[in-house]
Image (cartoon, helix red, strand yellow):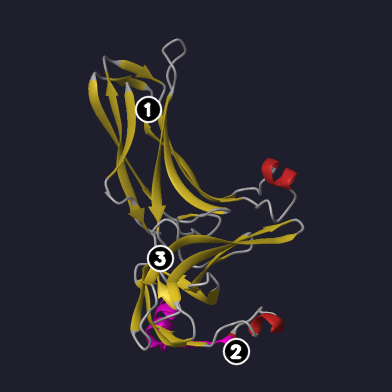
Amino acid sequence: MSLDIKLHRVDKVYRPGDKVTGAVVVQSQGAMKHNGIKIQVEGSAALQLSARSIGLFEAFYSSLKPVQILNMEFDVAQPGKIPNGVTEFPFEFTLKKKDCDLYETYHGVYVNIQYGISCEITRPMLSGKSLKKNREFYVEIPGDSEIKSTESRSKPFNFKISPESLKNVKVASKRKIPDFLFEGFLDHTTCCVSDAFSGELVIRKCAVDIKSIELQLVRVESCTYMEGEAREATEIQNIQIADGNVVRGLAIPIHMVFPRLFTSSTTLTKPFKVEFEVNLIILFSDNHMVTENFPIKLYR
């Protein structure tokens, strides 16, 4: 005997207010008695402190209490008998908030926001074990119309990187930095997740050879706990936009697609925050590097 949960949407992506429809599919070899078929829909934000934020002992043996976002339960079949062969039990529910807002599906390191449907077929005693099956689905939160209009009106963000603009560099170290000037622009720093992050970079001058130019997408996850706030930045992806000693004055396109499950709309709540940044990394031939950080705001 086998149990499966089939959703009618192939991509399994839903928005608040959508009807989620599907079927519980049971394949049985011979008729089978059961005490009912139940479905439970859950959504939660699991929060975990990192080892650097608190002591190693606490990091391995404690985590923050998950935030429950969604919880509903209903029957799809009353106690009875499942016939031989394949049987489908249709189900339907509306995706809507109850006690708190719905958040977008996100798979991070210290913050995980997940939604799932679980089905259980309970069987009479001595008839065999109960059957269980889980199926994840994905939630997208439409962007704020005010954010969208601001993004559409915003001008490109221009930047210049030179030895004088560098921060967190000791005075003694600045004397060893070669002379360079990098200029460019970002089309937007408030970006739609489904669109590409784009812009342009020009190497105006550089006294040493360039080895590589990379674009790094970083998530910044924050969890509030008893003693304060734990904040951790981790890399999502790193792409190379230039290789070797780039021709001076050449316009280098900046183009990066946001990965679906590892990015989401920028989320700021009391128990947790999910924010994003982009690092532009220029690596010189002597393996020294220059990094420029750009905080960005994502929306759906």
Instruction: Tell me the amino acid under the disc marked 3.
Output: Ile
Q: In which quarter of the image is the C terminus?
A: bottom left
Q: Which mark sits nearer the N-terminus, 1 or 3? A: 1
Which label lies toward us, 2 or 1?
2
Label 3 Cα neighbours within 10 Å, binned few <14 / some 14-19 / many ≥20:
few
Q: Name the residue under label 1.
A: 78
Mark toward the start of the polypeptide (2 vs 3): 2
Q: Can residue 144 be seen in this view?
A: no
Q: How many labels does the image show?
A: 3
Q: What stretch is highlighted in magenta?
A: 145-164
In the image, taking residue 223 as reference, residue 196 lies left or right, namely left
Name the side, left or right, on which 276 lies relative to 247: right
Residue ID for mark 2: 164
Q: Could you tell me residue 250's position as x and y percent?
A: 34, 85
Q: Position of residue 208 (x, y in %)?
A: 48, 81
Q: What element carries label 1?
A: loop
Q: Residue at x 44, y 18 (%)?
A: 129
Residue projecting furthest to the top: 126
CA–CA distance in space, label 1 to label 3: 53 Å
Camera-side residue of 128 and 282: 282
- Disc 2 marks a residue whose amino acid type is Glu
Mark 2 to mark 1: distance in Å? 73 Å
Mark 1 nearby-residue class (10 Å; few <14, some 14–19, many ≥20): few
Estimate the spatial distance between the alpha carbons at disc 2 and disc 3, rounded to whole Å.
Answer: 27 Å
Q: Which of marks 2 and 1 is nearer the N terminus?
A: 1
Label 3: state its secondary structure.
strand
Query: Tag 1: residue type?
Result: Gln
Quarter where residue 155 is shown: bottom left
Q: Does the magenta stretch include residue 114?
A: no
